[in-house]
Image (cartoon, grey):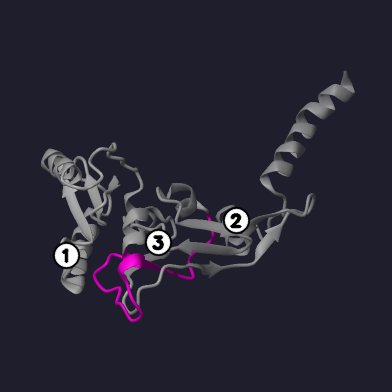
Amino acid sequence: MAASSSIGATIVYCPDGVCVGKEHVKRAVDLIAFITNARPPAVYYLEGTEGAAEIELIHNSSDNRQSALEFTAKPWKSYVNAIENISVEGSQATGLGITDIRLAESCTLCNACVNKCPHSALRIEGGDLIFDSRQCTGCGYCEQLCPEQAITMVQRTGSIEFEEKPVFSDEMVKCSKCNTPYASVKMVRKVAAALEINEMMPVCPTCREMGMYDALFGKAQSKA
């Protein structure tokens, strides 16, 4: 959760102390405080019941204490916004927990990382796997679950930069019936090898199901 008050600070709050990205945030908050030397700090990290009490104290001591304290369940987005707001040209990303990823050639665009990413930092468009560093908290889940062991997460160094970019590309196979791209060339070849056949009929799952339905029930209806 994140809360803002009239003191002009962002408070990143972890209720139970075990939030995803917690250590990244704590290191980043310390580094931001050191770089900016702001008093009070531009970003706070607090957790647990003691943290909640401190948030209430900060709020009650501000000019905005007559209004209700508002929380949003988007801590990483608030953190990213705070970094962008206080950074200047040439600001360095080292230690701020901004993640980048590397994809090996073993990637088949199987969609496992896209389906399981808890922060929607990955998506497939055409034959491209798109990575959005603005959404990625560095939790490492995609790296752990990738069946091809193709993902390596790295911490960004150099200048601060949040971006969307393609991190892997492959040619897509189109369905021979409806012309819809449905799988990468590497995935089709992998399945064909597992089935010990030279090639696969390029038919998408939807058309394959319709074909099976017609084969099973169409013939039965014609006999009736």
From the top left corner, tell me how far across and down residue 143 is, in percent. Answer: 37, 59
Observer-nearest of 2 and 76: 2
Rounded to the nearest angstrom, the CA distance separating label 3 from label 1 is 33 Å
The residue wearing badge 3 is 149
From the top left corner, tell me how far across and down residue 167 is, in percent. Answer: 49, 69
Q: State left or right for residue 36 relative to residue 139.
A: left
Q: Residue at x 78, y 26 (%)?
A: 217
Taking the image as drawn, is residue 106 in sight? yes
Q: Residue furthest bottom?
A: 90
The amino acid on which the numbered mark 3 sits, given as a three-letter code, is Gln
Q: Nearer the viewer, mark 3 or mark 1?
A: 1
From the top left corner, tell me how far across and down residue 69 is, in percent. Answer: 27, 39
The residue wearing badge 1 is 30
Residue 107 painted magenta: yes
Observer-nearest of 85 and 79: 85
**Of the image marks 2 and 3, the number of the one nearer the N terminus:** 3
Residue 178 painted magenta: no
The amino acid on which the numbered mark 1 sits, given as a three-letter code, is Asp
Rounded to the nearest angstrom, the CA distance separating label 1 from label 2 is 56 Å
The amino acid on which the numbered mark 2 sits, given as a three-letter code, is Glu
Taking the image as drawn, is residue 138 in sight? no
**Of the image marks 1 and 2, the number of the one nearer the N terminus:** 1
Rounded to the nearest angstrom, the CA distance separating label 2 from label 3 is 23 Å
Q: Which region shows up in magenta? A: 83-110
Secondary structure category for the residue under label 3: loop
Secondary structure mainly formed by the magenta segment: loop
Secondary structure category for the residue under label 2: loop
The residue wearing badge 2 is 196
Q: Residue at x 20, y 48 (%)?
A: 62
Q: Find out whether the residues at labels 3 and 1 contact each other: C-beta distance under 8 Å.
A: no
**Of the image marks 3 and 1, the number of the one nearer the N terminus:** 1
